[in-house]
Image: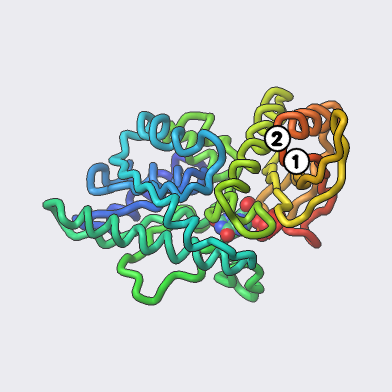
Amino acid sequence: TWTSANIVEEQVELIRQQVGDARVISALSGGVDSAVSTALVQKAIGDQLTAVFVDHGLLRQGEAEQVRQDYVAATGVDLKVVDAKDQFLGFLEGVTDPEEKRKIIGREFIRTFEAAEREVLATPGAPVKFLVQGTLYPDVVESGGGEGAANIKSHHNVGGLPEDLEFSLIEPLRTLFKDEVRQVGRQLGIPEAIVSRHPFPGPGLAIRIVGAVSEERLEILRRADAIVREETTAAGLDTEIWQFPVVLLADVRSVGVQGDGRTYGHPIVLRPVSSEDAMTADWSRLPYELLERISTRITNEVDEVNRVVLDVTSKPPGTIEWE
Ligand code: XMP
């Protein structure tokens, strides 16, 4: 029978067998999947694990701090933080194609981990042989890992890995759906704030900016996204909503009017969806009062945005993310 306790017990045993005396590096991204997979490995092998958090500068407001402080306090994991913001922004400069963004980010992630591995290797101990990945069952299926599945998007945590990858992968969530991952996370004692966090893509806000990524655009999106999360939480709707991407149409401008003057700003797209496993999704029927508060606050508080629009497309035919 499926229980989160059984899964934990089973995975801990499997991880111990797979790892032996070797050391492990974990791909901690800030999302639920990597948080839970890392905590599982931490439980299995303790101080043989070094978690590496690459701060690529593409997370939402406050999230990097949450990983560095709250998560470490909850799990006791040995965390190495790599500040790679400038590096990622540099490689993404001028890139508009979604798959190109994913490839660049996936590639830089691996490169950064390899550099981190070399640093860990320089400390005494067994060799580092394994890399933890928070791959879920839907990722496996959508990337063509399942039977007869089409390769819809090359999720960087499954496809697109470089050929000279030095690590073997540990993927303890590979057979699980999202709600099961959350149950496992609770079983492991990870704080509810992290366990119930909405899924967030590895490439982060880079694939929520339609157009090229820049620090200025990231800041606009972070401010709008923070307002959305604040209001959604205040309305008590976090658990009802599966995921709430906030998207900046960075290359689109529309005319507006505010105060005495004409504005020529960017639209923000709200993309709240309900879903069981991200394979299919329906647009969320949010209360008008909540939508109104979000719209008013974003257009008042984020100067560069003068229009807020709601995405009412299900998946299929839309995907959850815009890129
Ligand atoms: P889509 O947009 O394909 O998204 O409906 C399905 C789920 O996958 C997430 N997603 C990603 N996760 N790397 C990730 O780790 C990616 O490149 C990526 N693209 C989409 C998305 O947020 C949703 O939960």
Quarter holding ligand 1 = bottom right
Q: Amino acid at mark 1?
A: Val
In terms of depth relative to the viewer, which is nearer, 196 or 78? 78
Direction top: furthest residue:
234
Residue at x-position 51% and y-position 43%: 32
Q: Label for residue 305?
A: 1
The vertical placement of 225 against 235, above or below, is below
Q: Residue furthest front?
A: 260
Q: Where residue 27 sits: x, y (%)?
A: 40, 53
Q: Give the percent coordinates (x, y) of residue 82.
A: 35, 48
Q: Within 10 angstroms of label 2, few (less than 14), some, or many (20 or more) residues?
A: some
Judge left or right: residue 177 versus residue 165: right
Residue in the picture at 43% in, 37% down: 67
Q: CA distance from mark 2 to mark 1?
A: 6 Å
Is 48 located above or below residue 288 in the figure? below
Ligand 1 is within 8 Å of the C-beta of the residue at disc 1:
no
Q: Secondary structure at mark 1?
A: strand
User: Measured along the vertical axis of the image, is residue 242 above or below residue 120?
Assistant: above
The picture places residue 252, in percent across and down from the top left corner, at 77, 55
Answer whether labels 2 and 1 touch (C-beta < 8 Å). yes
For mark 2, what is the residue?
Answer: 302
